[in-house]
Amino acid sequence: MGKTFAEKVLAQKAGLQQITAGQIVTVKPDRLLTHDNTSAIAATFRKIGVARVADPSMNVIVLDHVTPAANETYAISHQATRAFVAEQEIAAFYDIGEGICHQVLPEKGHAWPGAVIVGSDSHTPTAGAFGAFAAGIGRTEAAAVMATGEIWLRVPESIRVQLHGTLPARVSAKDVSLYLIGLLRADGADYCSVEFAGEAINAMSVGERMTLTNMSAEMGAKNAVVEPDEKTLAWLAGRVTQPFAPVYADADATYASVIEMDTTTLAPQVACPHTVDNVAPITEVAGKRVDQVLIGTCTNGRLEDLRAAAEILRGKHIARSVRLLILPASREILQAALAEGIITDLIAAGATLLNPGCGPCLGAHQGCLAPGEAVLSTSNRNFKGRMGSKDAAIYLGSPATAAATALTGVITDPREV
Amino acid sequence: MKTRLTGRVWKYGDDVNTDVIFPGKYTYSIADPREMALHALEDLDPGFVAAVRPGDIIVAGKNWGCGSSREQAVVCLKEAGVGAIVARSFARIYFRNAINQALPIVTCDAVDGVENGDEITIDFAAGTVKTPRRVFTFPPLPAEVLEIIEDGGLIPHVRKQLGR
């Protein structure tokens, strides 16, 4: 009987001939990703009573959540992380300004086809866009992985998502993600591995695929994966130095469900307050006033996203009533966007540029919302209170929808500007 | 872990996310578990912190703890005195975090048979949740997982494994 991606990759890592969904296995992850929570994880690690991390080359640490430090408390936390990095001789440390951990991880060669990656962040599945098995864990668990070099994992059931057709103009991977989350709901993929395949996926850039795997966390997925192809390998060339062997699901693998979707007639989608699965086509929410627009984050802060926004905003100016924030996912992306003139165009259109990092997405700094305000954001969560006031409204959409909305000050269909 | 737990119910709905259990704006600024407890469920049920009593039980719908991986969403409730969480289903990272903090979690449909303030009894050995209206059953946790809870959480468990 055929095996899914998750069954094959976890069997390989566990050193077992064959495993099936539901089984618990112990594996040694290839990478452990942590961010600003490293200082707290380090404190828990010390309670275990071992002096050294099991394998320093496993650790990838990126300061991204509140960077640069917004106040003394954050500064002390960052300081503790830097001290831990030095003490444990961890080479893969990326200080403030390098970017968001889910973007920096692959950029710096820490994600590859067939790798097993765990991270103390719920959007760790993003790395599945490179054919890796990547799952989020908590802080205590990250400390235990540092100490033991191992983790137990329940082999997940799998859902296959087959995307057929092409994407219409100004409709993107984000709209596909939101549509699927609306369909499956917030728990539709709980504990599951989600495999994305089909010609619409093949046509997507690596960056767009990262949007899909990133958003899979919002349907409860343990991990999500896109099978590697020439685009993946081209993206990884010069970044990943070690040899790897891609893992592909068998054609006759057993799935908990198979979802077939034709994207050819998909409209832009918007997630309305206060849950990500509260999704409507843009035609139903167009006209709602917003005070702020955020384009960026680990979901949509890549070059193709900024390009899509600039294409709509170039030579124009945002509405007077709106604040537009641009948050590139990494330094590399910011540099590429500068070289292409995208940043110049966005700033000329009235945008405020933030440094690469998590920015206002988690409501800690750089553009929090006041009571009664509304935002259209390209990020991945619209939970109550997420971006500041619990009395603010967060709408989620694509970069094109966000740019069109910034132009008019009300939620706007990007196909109409 | 106690084999039986009797407590007063706090009833909540589906898809309660970790942002409303413990707001993101505190995740990197509050390190003391007692201070975390002061913000438990702040954006969902502002009256919770003042009224919760040790041993109270949260009973919820599906997908409890979805969203961010923040472990404070477990720690704040445990510190506030919550003795167990019973939900129709749990988001997977929350499920692991609860095990790792040795906060007992029970997956069953007890939310269908309780009202706020009811007294219910969880019998972990028998796999039952007794509410004033009916008895619900739940499957036992896998042995590997139960051992972590019985050791008092993942850190004591790992210390034991490593002989520390």
Image (cartoon, rainbow, N blue to C red):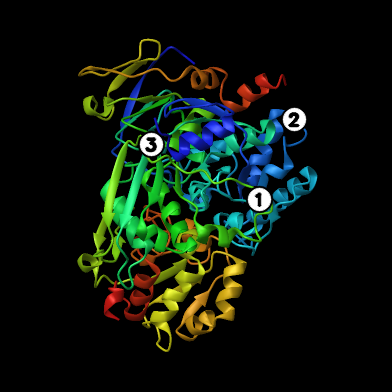
Let me know if marks 3 and 1 both belong to one chain: yes
Mark 3 highlights which residue? A253
Residue at mark 1: chain:
A
Residue A31: quadrant of the picture? top right
- Residue mark closest to the camera, 2 vs 3: 3
| Amino acid on which disc 3 is placed | Ala
How many callouts does the rendering have?
A: 3
- The percent position of residue A229, horizontal first and vertical second, equals 49, 56
Q: Which mark is residue A50?
A: 2
Residue at 50% in and 76% down: A352
Image height of A73 relative to A48, above or below: below
Which structural element holds mark 3? loop
- The percent position of residue A5, horizontal first and vertical second, equals 46, 40
Mark 1 highlights which residue? A61
> Would residue A243 appear left or right of B74 to someone viewing this image?
right
Residue at 46% in and 14% down: B2
| Amino acid on which disc 1 is placed | Ile
| Amino acid on which disc 2 is placed | Val
Image height of A26 relative to A173, above or below: above
The CA span between labels 2 and 3 is 42 Å
Which structural element holds mark 2? loop
Which quarter shows the C terminus of chain A? bottom left
